[in-house]
Amino acid sequence: MTLILGIDPGSRITGFGVVRDTGRGCEYVASGCIRTGSGPLHERLQIVFRGVREVIQTYQPTMMGIEQVFMARNADSALKLGQARGAAIVAAAEEGLEIAEYTASQVKQAIAGTGGADKQQVMLMVMHLLKLTQKPQIDASDALAIALCHAHTRQSLVPHGLATARRRGGRLRL
Amino acid sequence: MTLILGIDPGSRITGFGVVRDTGRGCEYVASGCIRTGSGPLHERLQIVFRGVREVIQTYQPTMMGIEQVFMARNADSALKLGQARGAAIVAAAEEGLEIAEYTASQVKQAIAGTGGADKQQVMLMVMHLLKLTQKPQIDASDALAIALCHAHTRQSLVPHGLATARRRGGRLRL
């Protein structure tokens, strides 16, 4: 069993989601949003850093998935996103998590079966896969999708024999 | 006497400079570059975070100046710069420093008397003001310039009576 954190960083709201990868699928553990408020930049970045650290210390995930950004809208929003992303990644690195980056289309492909899925489709699949009865907030849903993508990608990277052993309830940890 | 840190963050090299503001001018304390190498993103950001923290713990500055970015070249470089900036700012905020942002032209104006000064002119003024006999590396020079700008700007924000008291050798700390 592995706990996986997904993070969807933003300059105003950073979504987080934690799932438990049982080897036979994923279970919901927690999700939510870190809101940075309207203070000075360093306070907002500190809120992201401390928020991510608190989530990690509370739920003890060992891996983190985060979205890789290829096409930021413009230089100004890219700078703001980068700052929040830097604060979130440093928090996870300092807590010793393995960190993997996925493009938006990798996340959509893993969750909804197509890289062209929209946010609502991704959310419905997140709800289905994690058996959620209530809609999560959109940033939390995106973070859960990244965590699920990481769980899925890890699975598909497992050599066949090991994956089978794990599926049969072996004690193998990867 | 106040110790001021200047930081010039970048995705490959983060310059730092520490000056001592005696109230009658600034003295050089230290400067250098934090090089992030070519590892994965989270390792590079951790090198910035830990490097800035180490500089702060070594020299014990209480304030940090950092350049405010208005016009990044493009979205991709803005994202990379933002990530390094986020890591550096969080390190300083976690160490409890006061943080101030200055635009490039504010720094040039404070150091060289004109917002249009080029990097070489700024470096020569940094060397002159801090009585350096050797050229610092360019990133370290930029960081020292930001620290000097902060010292200068603080001075000019000091109410007249307080500034006078301090110039006369009073024990006043601001």
Image: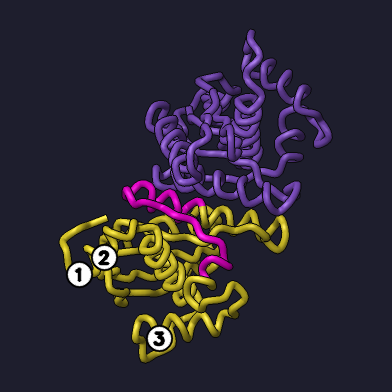
Chain colours: A yellow, B purple
Check disc 3 and report the residue beneath it. Answer: A128
The amino acid marked with disc number 2 is Thr
**For numbered disc 2, what is the local secondary structure?**
helix
Depth check: give the residue in front, B129 or B5. Answer: B5
Residue located beneath label 2 in the image: A164
x and y percent of residue A73 in the render? 70, 63
Please give the name of the residue rendered at 46% of the width and 81% of the height, measured from the top-left corner.
Answer: A137
Q: Nearer the viewer, mark 3 or mark 1?
A: 1
The answer for how far apart the CA atoms under marks 3 and 2 are is 25 Å
Q: How packed is label 1: few (under 14 Cα within 10 Å), some, or many (20 or more)?
A: few
Does A95 appear above or below B134? below
Instruction: Please name the amino acid that badge 1 sits on.
Output: Arg
Query: Which quarter of the picture shows residue A63?
Result: bottom left
x and y percentages locating residue B162 in the rendered image:
56, 37
Q: CA distance from mark 1 to mark 2?
A: 6 Å
Q: Is residue B12 above or below residue A113?
A: above
Q: Quadrant location of the C terminus of chain A?
A: bottom left
Comes first in the chain, label 3 or label 2? 3
- In the image, A167: left or right of B166? left
Pointer 3 chain: A
List the residue tagged with mark 1: A168
The quarter of the displayed image where residue A155 is located: bottom left
Q: Name the chain under label 2.
A: A
| Mark 1–mark 2 CB contact (< 8 Å) | yes
Instruction: Tell me the chain of label 1.
Output: A
Name the front one of labels 3 and 2: 2
